[in-house]
Image (spheres, rainbow, N blue to C red):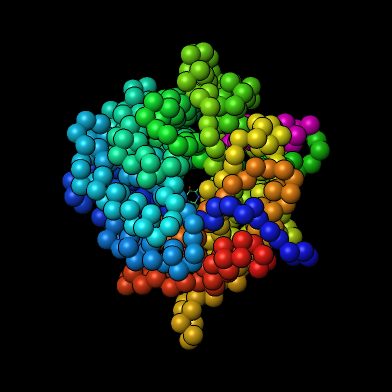
Amino acid sequence: MNKAIQFPANFLWGSATSAYQIEGSPLADGAGASIWQRFCAVPGNVRDGDHGDIACDHYNRYKEDVALMVKLGLKAYRFSVSWSRILPQGRGAVNQAGLDFYSRLIDELLANGIEPMVTLYHWDLPAALDDRGGWLNPDIADWFTDYARVLFRAFDGRVKSWATLNEPWVVTDGGYLHGTLAPGHRNLHEAALASHNLMRAHGSAVKAYREEGKYQIGIVVNIEPKYPASQSQADLDATRRADAYMNRQYLDPIFLGAYPPEMKEIFGEAWPDWPAADFDLIGQKLDFVGINYYTRSVVRHEPAHWPLRVAPVRQTQATYTETGWEVFPQGLTDTLVNFKQRYGDTPLYVMENGSAFYDPPQAEDGRVHDPLRVSCLRKNMGALHAALELGVDLRGYMVWSLLDNLEWSLGFSKRFGIIHVNFETQQRTLKDSALLYADIVASNGACL
Ligand SMILES: CO[C@H](O)c1c[n+]2c([nH]1)[C@H](O)[C@@H](O)[C@H](O)[C@H]2CO
């Protein structure tokens, strides 16, 4: 980088995880099953038959993991709550032991000067609610809101930053359209309905927070900027469809009061005219938006690819991660600037950003050297700063992820952590990327 970087004085540096990916002990202390336990139990759903029964054993090792956050000097920690630990049946009776676990975690964070940032839903729906239709049942907006109220009443004040959903697009596209994620459905009509119910539930929980809470609430969405493979009208139209489906579908109804018109074009008769009242609910004012950024995609028109009619175009002169994502830091800057231009100056946090690369085994010096992840982190810092210089109201950055963890249907095969986890021994080892991140946090970016 050619000039010293300085981030805003109170820029919030942290890391992110999610419950099912790191906690283990999914049924401990009265917790109920989630759709991810069910999904992992079906042979073929998750690579190598991996599952979250142990994962990073964070449920038992949370104090050790908070100590590692302290070692890195983190100011914040974004984590999710497992709905079925709190409400084992998804609704009704509260499991106090589940609340107690998160209360202990929150107090451990606060005692160490780390701000807890809580995500209410990071994909692990209670199995009992899935039995009642899950995100396909319109009642789920009320179920989710009741769950949210339990957490608001228990933790608001100690927790001052809440996010309703993590990535409704992934929940819908993976869980209901392509079946690659729990609950594994493949149905265009269901995908549309689940997506809309997710947004209704989001709005309902935000509305409840205005009655229950005193601090800030938002949503976390994944944004993958789309770039046309050519300037042909067909490719430009494909780019527009892809952007509407993955990006604008979730932010437009919140900030602009309507879904992108492309949704009808993509879903056809599977996309109804949703009730106008739903948009009043979905459009609740937010205190922030969390952006998860990993990569961009260059796209072309492809009639054979249902229902989007879009195909990605691999870039020849680019680096790709183990998950097949192009390393493209400019896309992070573009994403943040595009948000400001389209939706205005709602405060933003990058709530996830990271990369999966193969990590060599521990070296003789006892360290885990991850040069490719270090390089990505450095480039993304430059992209963040460029967005700040362009006037984006960016408040913080949570690196994904604190720990190597269960990468959903890819199992433990993909490592995103800045801290290596030996899943046989549960030994944690700081990677070089963790050491760099600690320097970035300590110097507020000046070390770059
Ligand atoms: C489509 O990519 C998303 O932006 C995305 C990437 N990621 C995510 N969402 C999820 O929020 C995490 O649980 C994943 O572990 C993480 C890494 O795959």
Question: Is 382 positioned to the left or the right of 63 in the image?
Answer: right
Residue 417 among those drawn in magenta? no
* Residue 287 sits above or below residue 412 on the image: above
| Viewer-nearest residue: 39 or 151 | 151
Note whether residue 198 is visible. Answer: no
Location of residue 411 by image quarter? bottom left
Residue at (36%, 72%) from the top-left corner? 427
Note whether residue 422 is visible. Answer: yes
* Residue 248 sits above or below residue 49 on the image: above
Q: Position of residue 137 (x, y in %)?
A: 35, 24
* Residue 444 sits above or below residue 314 on the image: below
Determine the residue located farthest toward the right in the rendered image: 231
- If the image is split into quadrants, where does the N terminus sit? bottom right
- If the image is split into quadrants, where does the C terminus sit? bottom right
Residue 239 among those drawn in magenta? yes
Question: Is 262 positioned to the left or the right of 351 in the image?
Answer: right
| Viewer-nearest residue: 410 or 417 | 417
Determine the residue located farthest toward the bottom in the rendered image: 364
The segment highlighted magenta reads 233-247
Residue at (25%, 37%) from the top-left corner? 87
| Viewer-nearest residue: 228 or 207 | 207
Residue at (20%, 47%) from the top-left corner? 97
Residue at (33%, 60%) from the top-left corner? 62
Main secondary structure found in the magenta portion: helix
Q: Position of residue 6 (x, y in %)?
A: 68, 59
In this rendering, the count of numbered labels is 0
Q: Position of residue 246 (x, y in %)?
A: 58, 36
| Viewer-nearest residue: 409 or 342 | 342
